[in-house]
Image (cartoon, rainbow, N blue to C red):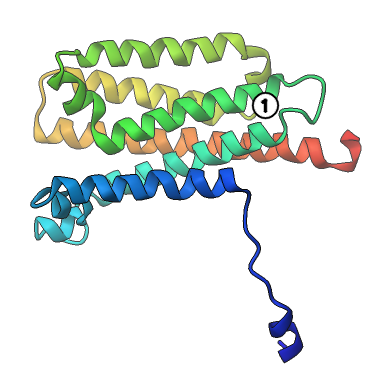
Amino acid sequence: MQLTEIMKFKIVLAPMWVNGFIFIPSTLFVCFLYYLGEPYIYEIMSDPITYFDGEVWTGFGSNIGIFIWASSSAIAIFCGIATLHAREDNTKPKFLILLGLLTLLLSLDDLFLIHDIILPHFGISEYIIYTFYAFSGLYIVFKYLNIISKTENFLFFIGGIMFCMSIFIDVIPSSPLLGFLEDAVKLIGIFAWSGYLIRTSLLFLNDCISPAST
């Protein structure tokens, strides 16, 4: 890198709405934490392993699942939005966006234990959440069945079956072995579901930008 290139370097600002979207919520969140004071500041901002003096591998499987879920949902939503107006027929992008949003919701549920702890605390049964997920999944399947049938859908259905199995194990009387089985089945389902989502997103995106599609 030459000195002239360094001298020509400029800081380029994003549009005001972008900067506001980034900095206003984060600043308000930090101010809210400061308002709460101790011990909430440390409880909310600390890493759980450090805070509870746990082992480094504590929650590793759960964290990996959430990371993969969130990554695949971000890829699907991005590819869906990026290709939404690329063609007159925007059915495929809408399919990606809906499936990505459902996956994002599942990852948030897993991260914050929404159906396990938060909603039951307000008197909302976890069965209502399971029903919502089931209807959402079935809606996407039947509405976009023609598209799904033309994709590499083996991973999609394996992921769905694994999720159903994990929910079934979750609602029956639990034991340590069943608890492990539930998490193991769910993790395999996350890998399969996310693999389908990422693979399909990239294929749809490539289909839009390839020379043959112009």
Query: Residue 70 at what x, y percent from top left?
Result: 44, 41
* Quadrant (top left/top right/bottom left/bottom right) for the N terminus: bottom right
Given the current orientation, which residue lies at the most extreme bottom position? 3
Q: Closest to the observer: 59 or 180?
A: 59
Q: Closest to the observer: 160 or 39?
A: 39
Question: Quadrant location of residue 79?
Answer: top right
Write the residue at 74% across / 83% down.
5
Write the residue at 68% across / 13% down.
146
Write the residue at 75% across / 41% down.
206
Position of 171 with respect to 98 (left or right) is: left
Write the residue at 18% across / 18% down.
171
Query: Residue 65 at what x, y percent from top left?
Result: 36, 42
Asked whether residue 153 appears in the rendered view, the answer is no
* Quadrant (top left/top right/bottom left/bottom right) for the C terminus: top right
Kind of element beneath mark 1: helix
Query: Residue 9 at what x, y percent from top left?
Result: 69, 76
Please state which amino acid type lies under the numbered disc 1.
Answer: Pro
Quickly name the residue at label 1.
Answer: 93
Asked whether residue 132 appears in the rendered view, the answer is yes
Position of 72 with respect to 24 (left or right) is: right
Question: Quadrant location of residue 179?
Answer: top left
Q: Closest to the observer: 144 or 81?
A: 81
